[in-house]
Amino acid sequence: MGAWRSAWGWLLWGSIFFYGSFAYADDSFGNTLDAITVKTAPTTDARAALATLKTAQVIYLGEHHTSEADHIAQLEIIKALHDHHPQVAIAMEMFQRPFQWVLDQYIAGEISEADLVAQTEYETRWGFDWELYAPILRFAQEKQIPVIALNAPNEVVRQVSSAGLASLEAADFEYLPPRSDLDLSNESYQALLQDAFTGHGQHGNFDFDNFFAAQVVWDETMAEAIANFAQRNPNTQIITLAGQGHVIYGYGIPDRVQRRLGENLKQQIVLLNPNPDLTPTPEVADLFWWTEAPTIP
């Protein structure tokens, strides 16, 4: 896995029923993406890639959290999809589920952007440069697009990582799926994570089983939030913003959403600007999208 293993390991440390296709007025959308799209695979260009996405109920835009190019591409993809099917929602790993009410107030125009940052405790709970995500939130507010807080509370994830699932008490599951829904059985996922962290070394009292359990808590919590929203809003297309480690191969979030909503659910996994050492095969993701940040004169 080489450099990809190293990069993905770092990212991990840092961080339905099918109700029919989503029809659009025409296929002449995505022009604004042409300027920043370098190439896509297996499709030939931005417009062809968007045409692939337009019939999916759940889309995953796998990002590198610090990449300006990734976040610009996410916003342009959201805009293009919204232009032709206004019933969209944006699901974000960057916000934790206890703060859904804050996002709702911001979208409704009841609080300011500064209040959103402060009341979601963004700087301490996520911490990446706010301006990378701010244009997406501003667009969501302007267009009244629902934003879904996906993530598990940091306190619970840290508890699992340090002491295991057995250390959780009943109150810890308030924003988590039931213990019976936390599926740790994917041996390929375990092997992928183990391989990634072998390259980083294991320091101190690192316990891989607990780390893997914490990763599954993240994934299952985010999957449950997406599935719950999809069941309540069957005609809404959900565009998910999450780190690539949570979507690659479908092991993290996508397979767990599929388990909840049924095999007929149509999903699309997109990796934005994937590591050069990663071979773009259908097993890894549905689409690979290389972009660049626009040059500012």
Image (cartoon, helix red, strand yellow):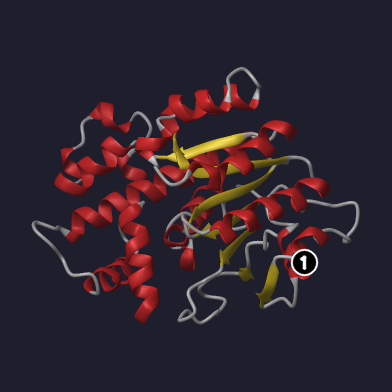
Q: Is residue 230 visible?
A: no
| Label 1 CA crowd tier, 10 Å (few <14, some 14–19, many 20+) | some
Residue 156: x percent and y percent? 27, 37
Query: Is residue 90 something one can see in this rendering?
Result: yes
Instruction: Tell me where residue 112 appears, x and y as whole percent.
Output: 58, 23
Farthest residue to the top: give it. Answer: 110
Residue appearing at x 36%, y 51% in the figure:
15
Give the percent coordinates (x, y) of residue 236.
70, 41
Q: Quadrant of the C terminus?
A: bottom right
What residue sits 68% from the left and 75% below the top? 39
User: According to the image, label 1 marks what residue?
Assistant: 34
Q: Secondary structure at mark 1?
A: loop
Which residue is found at the position 58% from the left and 62% from the top?
269
- Residues 37 and 288: in front is 37
In this view, the residue in front, 221 or 60, is: 60
Vertical placement of 39 versus 295: above or below? below
Does 196 appear above or below 86? below
Q: Quadrant of residue 51?
A: bottom right
Q: Residue furthest front?
A: 297
